[in-house]
Image (cartoon, rainbow, N blue to C red):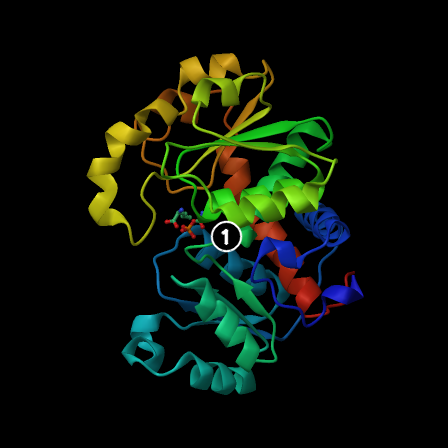
């Protein structure tokens, strides 16, 4: 889709429904080997937080297409010593063809994007993780062949994953329920945006009742209870979040064909039990693999590569 060439992906809401469906279709073609785009471009990974999947899948995607990757870990660059984002952005813009940024504040990726002309991809901020949700949607589509009439329930913290899921489900018309402890609900402005996007195509429900949220759901999804940067509150959160654990009892309330997703990394016996993670409903490893295909689709699209 030519319309994606040169574009940023800072929030999932930057994409239209048609653009998401296009990326998912391209990801499926890339996964099956039907198309093999080639490039000589350079991707920079400017990461201030740890990463296994995002770092490796972006690197492998670029490698498969013949491009290069530069690891610009904040500890290795002047960015980690306080060089202003505005300056870093204008300099990297002259060297790189695309950049993926993992950081804390959403405003940092927004500032970078304002000062750089190259496509800027949000590789996780405290507010959103759009790349993850593209892979999640590919995994749901592979399992069910549709988004229509399905319900995804997210259990746990109203964090970056919850926010991007709200927007992503709304965009593809997948009903979403978010079940969190009181005081940990997603930001009201993101919920409102998701409702606005969904219109009458899908429902958007926020609740504190995990059992009601699980009833008849087709996809059960969870994430860590304490995100990167919240490590000091991790122990205090355990008793608060335990009722939201994905375990056999919660799964029994869902649709009999329900699948279980987790963006990873996972803490077994905290947000998800070992048995459910390794059980027949889990699609977690396919989900992790799909990071590679969806991000390759995204890179090929924003770089404007010939798809052949
Ligand atoms: N799910 C995810 O983004 O994993 P990493 O933190 O390992 O990149
Ligand atoms: N919510 C988690 C997601 C990790 C991929 C975090 O931000 O640490």
Q: Quadrant of the N terminus?
A: bottom right
Residue 213 appears left or right of 301: left
Residue at 63% across / 75% down in the picture? 40
Number of numbered tags placed on the structure image = 1
Image quarter for residue 144?
A: top right
Q: Where residue 85 appears, x then y in whole percent?
A: 42, 79
Q: Where residue 64 appears, x then y in whole percent?
A: 60, 61
In the depicted structure, whether residue 293 falls above or below residue 86: above
In the depicted structure, whether residue 221 falls above or below residue 79: above
Along the line of sight, which residue is nearer the eye, 294 or 56? 294
Q: Does residue 295 appear anywhere in the picture?
A: yes
Report the residue marked by disc 1.
129
In the depicted structure, whether residue 192 falls above or below residue 273: below
Q: Does residue 290 appear anywhere in the picture?
A: no
Residue 280 appears left or right of 4: left
Q: Where residue 186 appears, x then y in whole percent?
A: 46, 43
For ligand 2, tell me if the residue under mark 1 lies within 8 Å. Answer: yes
Along the line of sight, which residue is nearer the eye, 295 or 175? 175
Residue 242 appears left or right of 206: left
Q: Quadrant of the C terminus?
A: bottom right
Residue at 48% across / 87% down in the picture? 91
Q: Secondary structure at mark 1?
A: loop
């Amino acid at each position: 889709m030519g319309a994606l060439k040169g574009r940023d992906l800072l929030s999932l809401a930057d994409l239209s429904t048609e653009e998401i469906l296009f990326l998912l279709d391209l990801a499926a073609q890339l996964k099956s080997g039907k198309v093999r785009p080639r490039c000589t471009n350079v991707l920079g990974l400017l990461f201030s937080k740890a990463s296994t999947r995002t770092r490796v899948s972006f690197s492998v995607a670029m490698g498969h297409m013949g491009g290069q990757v530069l690891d610009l870990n904040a500890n290795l660059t002047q960015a980690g010593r306080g060089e202003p984002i505005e300056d870093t952005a204008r300099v990297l813009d002259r060297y790189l063809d695309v950049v993926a940024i993992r950081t804390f504040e959403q405003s940092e990726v927004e500032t970078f994007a304002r000062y750089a002309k190259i496509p800027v991809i949000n590789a996780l901020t405290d507010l959103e993780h759009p790349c993850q949700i593209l892979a999640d949607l590919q995994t749901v589509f592979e399992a069910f062949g549709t988004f229509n009439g399905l319900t995804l329930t997210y259990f746990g913290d109203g964090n970056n994953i919850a926010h991007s899921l709200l927007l992503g489900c709304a965009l593809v018309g997948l009903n979403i329920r978010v079940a969190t402890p009181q005081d940990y609900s997603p930001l009201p402005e993101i919920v409102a945006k998701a409702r606005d996007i969904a219109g009458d195509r899908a429902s958007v429900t926020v609740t504190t009742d995990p059992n009601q949220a699980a009833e008849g759901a087709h996809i059960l999804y969870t994430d860590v209870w304490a995100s990167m940067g919240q490590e000091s509150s991790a122990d205090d959160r355990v008793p608060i979040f335990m009722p939201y654990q994905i375990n056999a009892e919660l799964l029994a309330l869902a649709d009999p064909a329900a699948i279980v997703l987790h963006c990873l990394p996972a803490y077994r016996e905290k947000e998800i039990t070992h048995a459910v993670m390794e059980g027949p409903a889990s699609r977690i490893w396919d989900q992790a693999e799909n990071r590679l295909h969806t991000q390759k689709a995204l890179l090929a699209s924003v770089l404007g590569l010939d798809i052949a």
